[in-house]
Amino acid sequence: MPFDDAAELKLRDVAHARQPLNYGRWLLWAVTLAIGIKFAWMVAHNKNFEWGVVAQWFTAQSILRGLSVTLGLTVVSMVIGVAIGLLMAIARMSDNRLLQILSGLYIWFFRGTPLLVQLIFWYNLSTLFPVVSIGIPFGPELVSWNANDLITPLTAAIAGLALNEAAYMAEIIRGGLLSVDAGQVETTQAFGMTRARALRRIIIPQAMRAIIPPTGNQLISMIKATSLVSVIAMGDLLYSVQAVYNRTFEVVPLLMVAVLWYLLVTSILNVGQSAIERYYARGEKGSTAPAKGRRGKPDDGGSLSFDTGEAR
């Protein structure tokens, strides 16, 4: 072999090739870290933040009590919102025109008005309806309550948060159900499953891959949305912080207490959301979770609809 050919082959040998350093990327990392460290230094050494006051109130009894109210409101409102949202999603996809219209109006109203306005409305419901009653339309009343006794800050907060959340969850769940192949519904009908059983056993488990990520986002948004209930005198985390700095006038450090608690809770929720997403993404292309005992390929997206009857 000629000497020139041997030298050219040696130059083309990629066995010991190395990727060249990307100096631009390293420079960007260095600049970003420098800015981050400088910002952290400024915040840590800024006396106006009064970090000693932050540490003093971070685990105070009143603050922890407000935090427990925030977490309780989040859990209760989210559970009710998901349950109502599931019903609204199924009604929206139903063949029954009346159910479609009613669910569409519900979603239109609660998504089209601000949550703060809804909370204030529920809190002042007694000004419009002094007595809340259940009875036959245009007939006798079966049972009634005094609205002032029924509508407390707690019930107003739960009603406002849950009903508003249900409108958004209805669209999230509907999108997840639409992501399931329509052939799955036909298969359940062929096996004689009822609609409720098909949803519970076949459709919803497959739709969870599309439902979980936006639901996690809604849960995190709900944590922050509970701060709005402070306007109706509900003793959540923000209300507890405000009650303290209205006495001590230490506004900034007390707000930092609330900020740190919100960041801590949402960070934990982010970790939980990632774990649930990995669980439902097992075996899917691009997933890092191992697939055990699963064969075949995931179904392609499709569309489906539900009626209110049972499979024949």
Image (cartoon, rainbow, N blue to C red):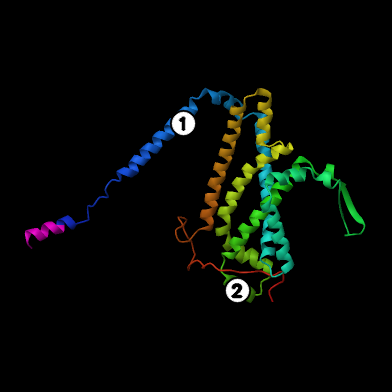
In the picture, the quarter occupied by the C terminus is bottom right
Disc nearest the viewer among 1 and 2: 1
Q: What is the distance, in whole Å, between disc 1 and disc 2 at their CAs?
A: 58 Å
Asked if residue 56 is positioned above or below residue 290 in the image, the reply reads above
Looking at the image, residue 159 lies above or below residue 203: above
Q: Residues within 10 Å of mark 1 (few under 14, many from 20)?
A: few
For numbered disc 1, what is the local secondary structure? helix
Are the residues at dot 1 and dot 2 in contact (C-beta closer than 8 Å)? no
Residue 245 position (above or below residue 109): above
Q: From the top left corner, tell me how far across and down residue 162 is, in percent.
A: 70, 49
The stretch drawn in magenta includes residue 69? no
Residue type at tag 2 = Thr
Q: Seen in the image, is 142 located left or right of residue 190?
A: right
Residue 217 lies left or right of residue 109; in this view the side is left
Q: Which residues are magenta?
A: 1-9
Kind of residue indicated by mark 1 = Ala
Residue 2 in the magenta stretch? The answer is: yes
Q: Position of residue 49 (x, y in %)?
A: 55, 26
Q: Dot 2: few (<14), some (14–19), or many (≥20) neighbours within 10 Å?
A: few
For image coordinates 92% across by 57% down, the residue present is 140
For the N terminus, give its image quadrant: bottom left
Residue 40: assigned label: 1
Rendered residue at 65%/35% (across/down) = 238
Residue 220 lies, in percent from the top left, at 59, 46
